[in-house]
Amino acid sequence: MTPDTLSQTVRFPDLFDKPLVATFDQQQASSDRGGVLLKAAERVYGLVKAFAGCLTDKRAPEKIRRARADVIGQRIDSTLR
C-alpha cells in the first residue's frame, strides 16, 4: 500500500464470516457497484421485496403479469451485469 491508499474494513456478521476489506488505491477504477454484497444482502434480508412494498402500484390490476418485486429484481440484476 502507498501513502495514498485508503483502506476500510466493514463487518457484516449476518452475511459473511470474514470482514469485508475495501481498498481504494486506484484513481480511475470502476467496480461492480457492490453487486456481490447486494445479492448476498437480498438473500438474507429480502431487500427487493421490502423496497417494492414501499411503492404504490398504479398499474391496472387486470393487466399485471409480473409482480412489482419481480420487475424491480430483474432491473437490479440487469444493472449488475
Image (spheres, grey):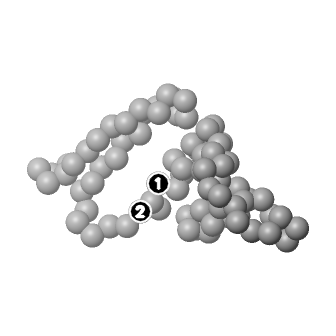
Mark 1 crowdedness (10 Å alpha carbons): few <14, some 14-19, many ≥20: few
Label 2 sits on a secondary structure element that is loop
Residue 63 in the image: above or below residue 22: below
Residue 31: which disc?
Answer: 2
Which residue matches tag 1? 34
In the rendered view, would you say 55 is above or below 58? above
Q: Residue at x 70, y 66 (%)?
A: 58
Q: Which mark is residue 5?
A: none
Q: 10 Å neighbourhood of mark 2: few (<14), some, or many (≥20)?
A: few
Horizontal side, residue 81 vs residue 24: left or right: right
Task: State which quarter of the image contains the C terminus.
Answer: bottom right
Query: Is residue 27 depicted above or below 44 in this figure?
Result: below
Residue 78 image point, x, y percent: 62, 68
Left/right placement of residue 4 relative to residue 25 reads: left
User: What residue is shown at x 41% (from left), y 39% (from top)?
Assistant: 20
Can residue 77 be seen here? The reply is no
Left or right position of 3 against 81: left
- Distance, label 2 to label 1, CA atoms, is 7 Å
Q: Is residue 50 visible?
A: yes
What amino acid does circle 2 point to?
A: Ser
